[in-house]
Amino acid sequence: MAKESTSQSGMKLAFNEIPNFRHGMNVLDITVPEALKRRINTGIDWVNEAFGGKGLTPSTAGLLTGTPGAGKTTFLLQLADSLTGSGHVCLFNTGEESLLQVRTTVERLGVRNGFVPGNDRMAADVLNHADMLARSNPGKQVVLICDSLQTLDDGFYPNGATNSMTPIRVFEMFTEWAKATFGIVLVIGQVTKDGKFAGKQQLIHMIDVHGHLMIDEKPKSETYGMRIFKMKKNRFGCSGKGFVLNLDSKGLTEAGSYTGEGEDE
């Protein structure tokens, strides 16, 4: 049974109850569900390291931002393929491109395992698709990847209108689903032309994980022209980790660790 709490936007969020919780109890007496003790191997070593050392944590609701052209979509397409190859079920829902465009891109990248594609605009339809996959694949971890947040609608307005609160409401729906099902959600967030997060800061406070992918544009830098991935927030592991990446026609590959400063979004 899940209990409800009201978010700042007024929506009801359902979170997993702690069965034995009572006021006054010691934190050491709280029982952590076995599902939360697992770590999901992504099949990509540097990604596992970035997300806490051993992979993704079930119930994670994460955001990916980055400078235009840095390779955000490429990264998540590679991740979706690798997750499938690692025995998990990955739904990649795109609102940025047609499914034919996605098919063409994965052919160029040379993906080996594939993933389940989706092209829904309504957040409820995306989650229904994810639930269907969970029912048809019992015992497997379901990972939902969305490209991108600004293309989705929560249906708050009957005429299909959206506003600055729409991404907040959509992400609340995704967070509710992740916490209630122990699913994993990774979403590309809207950015400005210089790669800064373009949404409300309320969203940054909501998320469990925030990764940022950027191009090193400093001519004197040893990594000039390369991609840098930084974990800016991670409730399930260490934040601040950075990785240097190469990008070519086959996608992103790790080139080393990153210790530079001043490259934040």
Image (cartoon, rainbow, N blue to C red):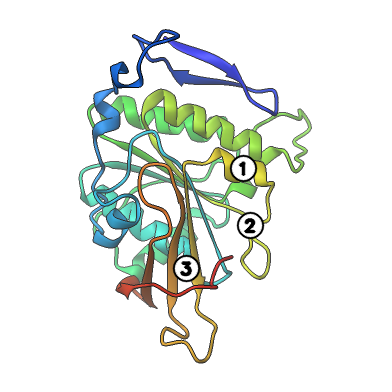
90 sits to left or right of 210: left
Instruction: Tell me the mark number nearer the camera, choosing from 2 and 3.
Output: 2
Front-most of 104 and 157?
Answer: 157
Does residue 214 appear in this view? yes
**Is there a contact, CB below 8 Å, between mark 1 and mark 2?**
yes
Image check: 62 left or right of 111?
A: right
Residue depicted at 70% across the width and 28% down the height: 9
Q: Which residue is mark 2?
A: 197
Picture layout, residue 239 above or below residue 194: above
**Contact between labelled residues 1 and 3, with CB atoms less than 8 Å apart:** no
Q: Which residue is mark 1?
A: 203
- The residue under label 3 is 71
Q: Amino acid at mark 1?
A: Leu
Mark 3, secondary structure of its residue: loop
Residue 46 in picture, x, y percent from top left: 29, 62
Q: Is residue 151 left or right of residue 182?
A: right
Residue in the image at 47% along x and 84% along y: 225
Instruction: Check the image and report above or below for 116 versus 28.
Output: below
Mark sitting earlier along the chain (3/1): 3
Q: CA distance from mark 2 to mark 3?
A: 16 Å
Q: Badge 1, how many Cα within 10 Å: few under 14, some, many 20+?
A: some
Q: Give the residue drawn at x 77%, y 41%.
A: 163
Distance, label 3 to label 1, CA atoms, is 22 Å
Q: Secondary structure at mark 2?
A: loop
